[in-house]
Amino acid sequence: MKKMLALALSAALAAGTLAGCGGSGGSDSGATTQAAAQGGSAETKAEAKTEAKDVFWTFAAPPASSALYPYWVSVGQAVSTVFPQYKITTSESQGAVAITKSVRNGEADVGNSVSSTDYENYNGTGTFEGQPFKDLRMLFYYEVTAEMFCTTKDSGITDLKGLDGQRFNPGGTGTSAEDLCHKILGLFNVNPDYFVASQADAADAYSNREIVGTIKLGPVVDSYVMQLNASVPVNVINLSDEEIAKIIEAYPFLIKVTIPAGTYDGIDQDVNTVGTPQGAQTTTKLSQQDGYNIVKAMFDDGKSIWQAAYPSGAENDYVAMTLASTVPLHAGTVQYFVEQGIEVPEELIPPEYVAVQ
């Protein structure tokens, strides 16, 4: 069931004096800055920025070798440019699982995530079996990434079965790519001789022909796969419709992804695989106002900053991807969507959300 959350504009708002509404926990630094972000006089804006207290956050990003790392650097830049009271440190991590653990334990305030890990983290399944984390909240999703099974062309391996018994890297240690690799290959009873390593070490092993291939979960156009292809010509395994259907039936948080022909040199046909949306996760500790400010900076006022750093994501439909979440949204995200007149599915509205009048 869905419901439209209507945004009511008060007389005070009409007069140009907005009052921020804080959520549960987190700083209340955004309360004075919402007026500056949404309207009011120049004096009001100046006063709001002067009164805001500095807030120090850590944003956990994918590995520096990932095409998504520059995006996350630009996220911090966009948010802190629009709202200077936020002092953001962007830290490199080893992948979505490691990042999720850092957000769970409070080492990071916001972090990159993938929908598969989000689902398991919230519900206490898979990697987080028996450890549901009901304080997980999604700020937004921003990119669909593909699970790319990369093999050396001269290995002759063109399907999953060909990986059986071969020296193969399942993805960087602690990454969602690694987790999905074990899930998918296990589903088809394929058992490689796994070479467990970081993404950087796996790339070295690939270029030195110590392994027949590796996995990368990343944007369809991925710099890591380009790096592999530049060292030793790469083949990305094409999954059949039957294989994709079986995978999605077992793991419904995955989707079909097509890599267009010509995306990588030497690959002249479309490649079908499965993938997962990438997003920005946080917890209920982040106040509604702070969450609202982050989303507003990303969707509106700071958009040009991250688009310059990550132009391939400029045309992505953030709203549609975010509304397809399998876990609750952050209260600040709901507030922003309501303000824009966007319908939010009831199951995505967290209990701590407070409507702004």
Image: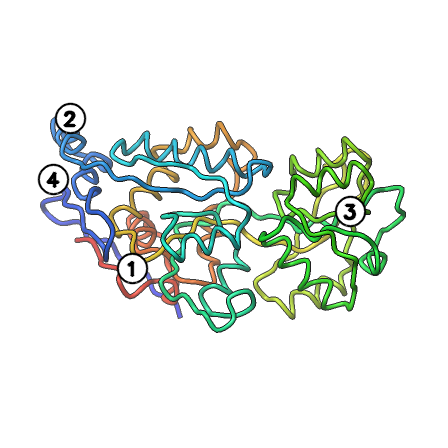
Residue where numbered disc 4 is placed: 17
Q: Nearer the viewer, residue 326 or 89?
A: 89
Q: Secondary structure at mark 1?
A: loop
**Badge 2: few (under 14), some or many (20 or more) residues near its Cα, within 10 Å?**
few
Q: CA distance from mark 3 to mark 1?
A: 49 Å
Label 2 near label 1: C-beta < 8 Å? no
**Badge 3: few (under 14), some or many (20 or more) residues near its Cα, within 10 Å?**
many
Q: At label 2, which amino acid type do we have?
A: Ala
| Labels 1 and 2: the sequence-earlier one | 1
Q: Nearer the viewer, residue 1 or 212?
A: 212
Residue 198 position in % (x across, y down) = 64, 45
| Labels 3 and 1: the sequence-earlier one | 1
Residue 285 position in % (x across, y down) = 29, 55
Q: At label 3, which amino acid type do we have?
A: Gly
Q: Which mark lies nearer to you, 3 or 1?
A: 3
Residue where numbered disc 1 is placed: 5
Q: Secondary structure at mark 3?
A: strand
Q: CA distance from mark 1 to mark 4?
A: 22 Å
Q: CA distance from mark 1 to mark 2?
A: 31 Å
| Labels 3 and 4: the sequence-earlier one | 4
**Badge 1: few (under 14), some or many (20 or more) residues near its Cα, within 10 Å?**
some
Residue 134 position in % (x across, y down) = 38, 66
**What residue is rendered at 10% in x and 39% in y?**
15
Label 2 near label 3: C-beta < 8 Å? no
Residue where numbered disc 3 is placed: 213
